[in-house]
Image (tube, helix red, strand yellow):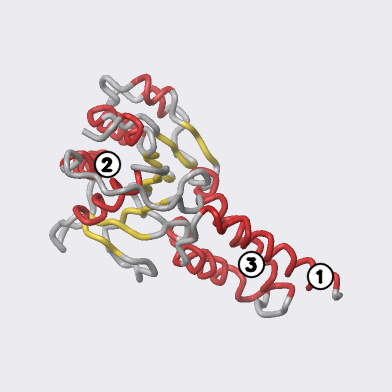
Amino acid sequence: MLAPSELGRLRVVLVAARNPLNIGAAARAMSNFGFLRLRVVHPYDVAFREARSAVGASALLATAEEFKTVAEAVADCSLVVGTTALTRRELQHPLRRLEDGARLIRKQLASSRVALLFGSEKVGLRNEDLSHCHWLLRIPARAEHPSMNLGQAVAICLYELVRHSGAARQPAQEQPATAGELERITALLLDALRSSGYLSPRSAPSAEEKVRRLVRRLHLPARDAGLWLGMLRQIVWKTRSGK
């Protein structure tokens, strides 16, 4: 198994889950493998904490954290990974198979928090949700039936995370910037682009997702986040003051 500190650094984030039984099944899978930090974003049913499917995991479900947006749910995480079934969607992110992605997540858990996102049963993660991710993960499945039940998908991903956790550990890497820091950088960069006239109001919605993905592709370390924020604040101030 992963060390308790590593288990505690993973946040399983369920975005707009529609069925309380699926949320309960996800909580049960988390408890099976020792991951105890569940976050839900805009759950469809307010009664999800009483789901009968959370056998043995009622305490985990009772302490699940609720958020209104994905940005808030992943703000303290340095790596944000989304899951996808690859149906009817043009991907804008690197895509990794489950076994490869699990290895990278384990490596990150040695030193920092990771958010693993699962979308709603009906539509999965939306493009706006995906724009907060560094890369995407998929469970191999046949093309004729690629999507899985939410609780089962959570169980498979978490099992893969612990399956090879006894392997030799790599030295801890430099601490990356958190998603919250990256989102603040994104907001300031968008402000600078608007103030300079680079962005037009008509292109703003799609531009926000593109800029968010661009910032995450930079893989900024935490020690550089403050410098970027300071530079962008100065740029925004200069463009607005006209000096």
Q: Residue at x 31, y 67 (%)?
A: 88
Where's residue 114, x and y in %? 39, 45
Q: Quadrant of residue 149?
A: top left
Name the amino acid type tagged 3: Leu
Foreground of the two, 44 or 61: 61
Where's residue 181, x and y in %? 57, 52
Q: Is residue 189 above or below residue 15?
A: below
**In front: label 3 or label 2:** 3
Where's residue 234, x and y in %? 75, 65
Name the amino acid type tagged 1: Arg
- Quadrant in which the N terminus is drawn: top left
Helix, strand or loop at label 3? It is helix
Tag 2 residue: 154
Tag 1 residue: 240
Where's residue 123, x and y in %? 36, 54
Disc nearer the start of the sequence (1/3)? 3
Name the amino acid type tagged 2: Val
Q: CA distance from mark 3 to mark 2?
A: 34 Å
Disc nearer the start of the sequence (1/2)? 2
From where the camera sits, is residue 118 visible?
Answer: no
Helix, strand or loop at label 1? It is helix
Tag 3 residue: 189
Label 2: few (<14), some or many (≥20) within 10 Å? Answer: many
The answer to whether residue 88 is left or right of residue 144 is right
**In front: label 1 or label 2:** 1
The answer to whether residue 184 is left or right of residue 21 is right
Label 1: few (<14), some or many (≥20) within 10 Å? Answer: few
Disc nearer the start of the sequence (3/2)? 2
